[in-house]
Image (spheres, rainbow, N blue to C red):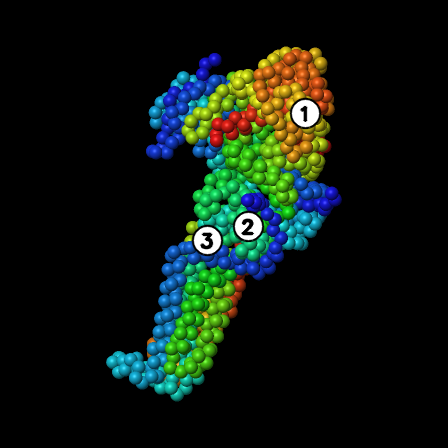
Amino acid sequence: MASAPVIQTEGLCKLFGQQRALDNVTLKVFPGSIGLLGPNGAGKSTFMKCLLQLQPITSGSAKLLGREVGREGREIRKRVGYAPEQNCHIPGMVGCEYVTYCAQLSGLPFQAARQRAHEMLDFVGMSQERYRKVDSYSTGMKQRLKLAQAIVHDPEIVFLDEPTNGLDPKGQAQILELVQGLWRNYGITVILSSHLLHDVERVCEQIVIIARGRVLVHDTLENLKARKRGAAEVVLARGHRELQAACREKNWACDTLPNGHLRIEHRADTLNPLLTLMDELHLPPLEVIPSPNALEETFVQALEISHAAA
Amino acid sequence: MPLHDAHYQHWDGVHTGIWTRRWVIAHNGLVACLRNKALRSLMMSCWFGGLMMAGALFCIGQLLVPESSVALWVPKMNPNVQAFVRMLTSWLQDHPEISVGTTQNVLFYYYCVYSLPLSIFALGMALPTLVTRDLASNAIVIYSSKAVTRGDYLLGKFCTAFGVMAMTWLGPVFFGWFMGNLLAPDWKFFWHARIALVHALVFGLCSMVILCSLALGVSAISRREKSTPAIWFIWWALGLAIQPIALHTKPWLRHVGFGYDLRQIGLAVFNLGRDLKTAQDGIPIFGQFLQGISAETRSAINDPTIFGALGGLAIMLIVMALIIRKRVVPE
Amino acid sequence: MNTLIEAQELSRWYGIVMGLNNVSFQIEPGLTGLVGPNGAGKSTLIQIITGQLKPSSGSLTVFGQEPWNNPSLLRRIGYCPEGEAVAKELRPLEWLEALGLLSGLRPDEVKGRAEAILDKVKLPREHWGKRLGQYSKGMKQRVKLGQGLLHDPDLLVLDEPMNGLDPMGRQEVAQTLKDLAAHGVSILISSHILAELEALCNNILVLNWGRILASGSQREIRSDIKNWSEELEIECDAPEKLARYLFDAGVLAGFDLPPEKELLRIRVKDAASFYEQWTGLLLRSGIMVHAIRSRSRSLQNIYDKVTT
């Protein structure tokens, strides 16, 4: 299905004095759920801020939803949602009031804004807390509120910066499920910027890695995993030593991880050779996870290559 | 029983215009201001001032009604005051087209200028809801990501401040003028007093625009909610304190106080000097009263240092604009 | 193996508010993860271990002694707290040197030690001249980790040590911690990121509502056949075909074909006998398998189970 790119940049440059935060970034991103990764201070946040017009562009062009970012700011932002990393609610306001206000600022008339505010608060799982002042919210509530205000105006694309920050595991899982649903069920493009690679792997289909002001990687997660297919993480109940010995015989690298799992490089496209080996040894696997840490390895590799090139 | 779809729904309505969004910002700011109980009480007292003004105009109007209690009260007054009141009454009767306008002009000058401090105080209390709180809580980032520009945001906040001043100053002034003339013995009072209203509105609108801009700038200086009102009040107090000192040392220093500068504008707009002279012609005994005024005050009234005031205010506004430009940015 | 930390009927109350409610556990030396929802009592427990709070009743001993009011014991414990509270006006070396002197290091050795620590936590030298107030979250985190390591503790207690670090930073800190553990330092990490705890720690402690809900090593949990899952998720080329094959083999209690293509979820009748034949079945079905995941194995699932 041919669709227009949601983000399109050409030769995008951003300078902070002498420092090149973004160096000739040319990128075309199509609708989907995209993970935006990168080391701290290396251009990832600057990239997002330039697209959202929180920072002016030095040179080059950037189009968001087909419109030039510098010129049609207001029009674009009617269809863009943003949930920043830090807390940014307006103190003294009640939860549903705040979300209604945000909807109105994005161009919704009051009746529609109020209605959608409550619908979105339902969607993110907030019940009676919506009638309390936002100052009294826990971290989990604040994150949900941020998400609600980011999608209340039915945007086409939503930028989420570390949406699970400060949440306990259950809260993280809930937010991630919501975020996952945004693209899968409702067609809203999600740009997730996070340092937690496991979250990104779970939610995103495309990956963009920005480091040293450049785009190092832009590919689908599936492709990235396919490149790392030759390794698997095996969880066994018993018989670790036997498996390790057998792998050594076959010349397959086998490491023991701190949690007791074995990481085996079988260098095949599917798990069947590994399963054959385990069948011969009568060792049932409890779990076999392919291309474990594929994203982390891609990330590290990309950075090393860019370091070497610099 | 069919289940309703309570999941996420898309929205494809018509977006509101930019002026609606600006109004939303202003309205939200005003609501936040009005949450402050002290500010609400202050507003009530300002309207009480307007009521007093209406009462004063009513009393003056009643001088022309022979059977009124005011007229009957005159003989009981102090002889000098009695003479003044009788001359005033006859002037009002003989030359209403000049006298009513002049009297009200003078009265409104003093009312506008001396009720201004209450509004300045109210603005000081409202400062945190302008930009300060948004800076502290990072809400500026949220505003930047919505369909409004920095200019829209500032315009909205400016209108919040304007609204506060309208409720504490312009509203009571207009109310005082309207009720005072409504309760006058003759409908023609409205017409005769038009000049006072025009002056009050011109002075009012100028002062409001200037004060609101200054307030917006001061509110952007710091993130701390206690600091910005403190800076505002200290600046105001400094301006007041410097008047007597600067008068004898460096007269241009007086322009540091925005209260002083606004008073100069008031003197120029209301043309108080000319009106006092007109009143002197109409009420001979009034001249005797004016003799008691010091030469300094007389020259201050007759020759307002308008250019100095405008210059001082212009510098202040430029500084505020620079502060706003630097501080109101999403980080 | 001697016990590192032992709690016996430990309670801590804040008036009527409960911090910890009658907990008893033992933590062995090594890498231990502490996990639980917000408000579960993790901070209270950490504060008792690091000697900042006194138990209301019961006892907690670290290395056999109680930490409260015990400077000689506290010298063996390093603490890297959560939050971004650092001395904003100081530079990192100044901060570390001051803390080092407080911990009893000699003035002549403290400077060298501070520099060595900053190198160890990989804080780039070009930032050493800046004040701590100007640091990013990640850099502050490294300095905090450094101050926990400064006096060479035997036990290091960390509260969300990876907060704000990018993936490279996380890996570096994880490696540093693994190296420390290899050198005999015991580490207690409190974190919300289960995947990282799973990859790093041998032992896990799950808290909720001031009580211990689960504890033990990940291996212990896995090696018990009672814990073997009866629910599996298989990624393969032809899920329907595999489902039919397994069904015909008579091992399934139920299966599910979720909308995500190439995925099959199964429930088996009897875990023990199933696992004996498992690999054989898969291979004989002739279908290419890409992944096998257990639905109730990982830390996430154990956590979900105990914290509902």
Q: Which mark lies nearer to you, 3 or 1? A: 1
Name the amino acid type tagged 2: Arg
Q: Which residue is mark 2?
A: A116
Name the one closer to the observer, C123 or B305: C123
Query: Quadrant of the image for the C terminus of chain A?
Result: top right
**Residue B212 spot, x, y in % from top left:** 49, 61
Is label 2 in a helix, a strand or a loop? helix
Q: Residue at x 45, y 47 (%)?
A: A131
Asked where in the image residue B81 lies, by quadrant, the reply is bottom left
**Residue labelled with disc 3:** B128
**Dot 2: few (<14), some (14–19), or many (≥20) neighbours within 10 Å?**
many
The N terminus of chain A - image quarter:
top right
Q: Work out which residue is located at the far left of the displayed protein and give it.
A: B76
Q: The residue tagged with tag 1: helix, strand or loop?
A: helix
Image quadrant assignment for residue A205: top right
Q: Are marks 1 and 2 in contact (CB under 8 Å)?
A: no
Please tell me which residue is depicted at 42% across the width and 60% down the height of the picture: B122
Name the one closer to the observer, B255 or B110.
Answer: B110
